[in-house]
Amino acid sequence: MKKISTFLQLFIISILLLGCSKTDPVSMPLIEKTTEVEKLFEHSKEFTQKVYSYENGIHAAVGYGIANSYLIEGDGFNIIIDATDSVFQAEKVFKEFNAINANPIAAIVYTHNHGDHTLGAKYFLDQQDEAPLVIAHESTAKSVEKIFGILNPIISSRSSKMFGTALPEEDVVNVGIGPYLSVGRSAPGYIKPNVTFDNELKINIAGIAFEFFHAPGETDDQIFVWLPEYQALFPGDNIYKTFPNLYTIRGTSHRDVNAWVNSLDRMIALEPKNIFPSHTLPFSGDFAIETLMIYRDGIQFIHDQTIRLMNQGMHPEEIIENIELPAAVAASPYLQEFYGTVRWSVKSIFNGYLGWFSGNISELDPIPTFKRAKFVSNMVGGPDALFAELEKAITNEEMQWALELSDLLLAMDYRASEVARYRAEAAFYLGTMASNPNKRNYFLSEAQRLIGDKEPDNIIPPEASMLDQIPMDMFFDVLRVNLNPDKVDPNEIITACFEFSSGLSKAMILRNQVAQIKGVLPIDCTLNIQTDEQVLKQVLAGIKNPITEIASGNLIVDKDVQFLKLLTVFRP
């Protein structure tokens, strides 16, 4: 008999502890794996941990975290394409690659900014005295800084749910494009690119002709790598063996789906024979172009049909109900919904062109959820009746309806602990039944949080060496968006002037409950701060104590009490 997972044990125990009164949540039903969920388990074969070697001196490390890492043997030097998702995985990959060829690394290539491609780079770099080239698109560094800076808390939290990093290992089937995310298993090892380009770059590295092309798709900074000598294409994340994430539920800037199609067309025009994607297994032969073609057709179909139905005045939910992939596309093993989905893609395309307003006037300025909850509650006979409807939905396994009913009851703070447990039961059921691992892991993670009041871990915690890779400008941007207006006197103007040993100067002006950042110091400053950039970075990241740094002279402040008070306005 298969061992029951820790999470399932926790769930069963929590249900039993609730007792068996009429108003307590019912016991969890035994949920059998559906055919679609069985397919997800089968999909895990794509990520068997192994290094695959090819005659042309290309080696693929698959299953070490989420993203593949590639070794290309050159003349006296090696080249790495994508550096895995962590130093933890990079150490294992380097050992495997080093056993194949121990030559020094001439270059590390980032196909784009996502952490599963960049956060292991430092380990590769640290294994040799001479720093390699670090090649990426010119916008990659800014994209990394945005994720590590102003979006880190929310992206980290939502990524943790989507990838199931807080779930017991046995509860994560896979994450659609890899076995599991390893980001939190070691300090981040991102290294800022030192060779960047705009549209294309053609250079010879270790005797091999490399051609790099900007190819927007899953990210705006996406590139693909072409080795004409080998007819080898490294498409990054613009193709993998699952329906693409035209939108990701962890949150992202709008993904230009039309540009994604155009990027695939540029790849197809090269007539590649060997495809080495950043996720899932490499493939080759005549099948290569055929696969690229059906993949781009699937994306274009969703894009074009969404636009067509938008122009007929349909709202997103109506469009979703009227779109069905062509049979050949739907049958392709490369377009099964193990990562992205048609439904989420339609919503993202609609939003990208028309914004969040669907066109339905009832959605423009809806009544607050609390007020809607009151209206619905009164309509069905009061909160007791609404709670009874929740119980009925759980009993009838109408779990999505149960989630929506729980929204209303929680908005009224009615029997909140019991409602939360029902909500957890619904989330667990829907997650277990989901064959899309993004949804599956997100729902199971939310169920776990509701049961144990456990928030997802910060999978990208601050780390001193990582701060070197983030410019000071980003830290001031982080301060801006973390200003708590409730802690600021609306009638007071404060000008904090920062002078750094590097020669950089920054002025932060608190006015009208916003923080304006300027690169030129004014004549009059309320506060004067002199320090090293790294010291302030570590203070702001919570690695160093500001009081200790002031006492040691590393942070020179003319009004230390007022400075410490200033720091508090940037906390929740």
Image: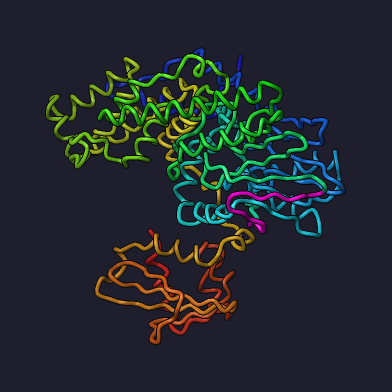
Quadrant of residue 39 in the image? top right
State the residue in front, 94 or 299: 299
State the residue in front, 212 or 195: 212
State the residue in front, 373 or 120: 120
Q: Is residue 17 visible in the rendered structure shown here?
A: no
Residue 261 x/y as whole percent: 51, 34
Q: Is residue 542 visible in the rendered structure shown here?
A: yes
Residue 283 x/y as whole percent: 69, 26
State the residue in front, 35 or 135: 135
From the image, give the main secondary structure of the stretch colored magenta.
strand
Q: How many marks do you count on the picture?
A: 0
Residue 92 x/y as whole percent: 75, 41
Residue 193: within the magenta? yes
Quadrant of residue 181 in the image? top right
User: In this image, 338 relative to 303: left or right?
Assistant: right
Quadrant of residue 43 in the image? top right
The vertical placement of 292 against 372, above or below, is above
User: In this image, 108 relative to 297: left or right?
Assistant: right
Residue stretch in magenta: 192-206
**Farthest residue, direction bottom:** 523
The vertical placement of 377 against 84, above or below, is above
- Image quarter (top left, top right, bottom left or bottom right) of the C terminus: bottom left
The vertical placement of 143 against 509, above or below, is above
Residue 102: within the magenta? no
Figure coloring: rainbow
**Farthest residue, direction front:** 269
Residue 371 x/y as whole percent: 17, 39
